[in-house]
Image: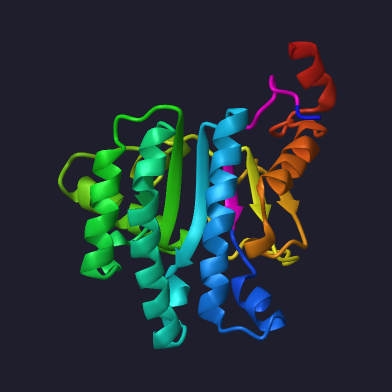
Amino acid sequence: MINKNNIPSHVAIIMDGNGRWANQKGLLRAIGHQGGVEAVRDTVEGAAEIGVKYLTLYAFSTENWSRPKEEVDALMELLVQAINDETKTLNDNNIRLLAIGDIDALPEKCRNKLNETIHSTSENSRMTLILALSYSSKWEITRAFNLMLCDFKAGKLSGTIYPEIVDQYLTTAGIPDPDLLIRTSGEYRISNFLLWQIAYSELFFTETLWPDFRRQHLFEAIEDYQKRERRFGKTGDQINNSI
């Protein structure tokens, strides 16, 4: 049973297993990605239902551009279609859409549709859905260093660099760090995702392939999260005595 008083504010998910799901069924990989859209829809609705404030989905990495062109093209078309189909649902459910990553690298049609929906949902406040597109953490951190260097040369930045300053130069600036990171498909790695931001996140791994993932799987992960003691480098006694 989920404790409604201990809901993680920010949940991030590495959505993995679309290709394997399709292969197991003798289908094209593109069909697996289509199957993942329903998983996104149900997970987003479930997260909003229980009070999650931020949900970040790792949809497409910078490394994914090296996949076969036909698969990448299919993914981009699917992304445009999904964003177009779900915009009304996002607004009806008071959910804001944001995106992080090298958005300029996306095809123009995809980029325009994404920006339209971000603008259309900008006033929504129930939950923020963040899509990580053409994203990798090494890209993001390198970009942040270059931006800081530019500001230093321009006299806008001086002195010692603190973590709080780095935060301001990341694509997630203004977004709280994830409390819980979920990875599907039975893989036990982070895959270059939010490496700076998940320093103290709780990690949950499930064997479920992404197209089969539904809100009940999200709830199971949150129930597991609620059993843990988050210490942030302190001792258990320190945490208990501060309550």
Q: Is residue 236 left or right of residue 191?
A: right
Q: Quadrant where the C terminus lies?
A: top right
**Does 39 appear above or below 130?**
below
**Does 129 appear above or below 113?**
above
**Does 201 appear above or below 48?**
below
Residue furthest to the left in view is 154
Residue 34, x across and y down, in percent: 51, 68
Q: Is residue 143 left or right of residue 210?
A: left
Q: Residue 20 versus residue 167: which sits nearer the camera?
A: 20
Residue 213, x across and y down, in percent: 67, 56
Look at 54% across and 44% down and name the residue there: 44
Q: Residue 160 versus residue 171: which sits nearer the camera?
A: 171
Question: In this view of the protein, can residue 192 be seen by the observer?
Answer: no
Look at 53% across and 70% down and name the residue there: 33
Q: Is residue 10 magenta?
A: yes
Which quadrant holds residue 169? Answer: top left
Residue 143, x across and y down, in percent: 34, 58
**Does 127 appear above or below 29?**
above
Look at 29% across and 54% down and name the residue there: 114
Q: Quadrant where the N terminus lies?
A: top right
Q: Magenta stretch?
A: 3-14
Q: Is residue 173 magenta?
A: no
Look at 76% across and 20% down and name the residue there: 239
Residue 237, x across and y down, in percent: 84, 20
Q: How is the image coloured?
A: rainbow
Which quadrant holds residue 232? Answer: top right
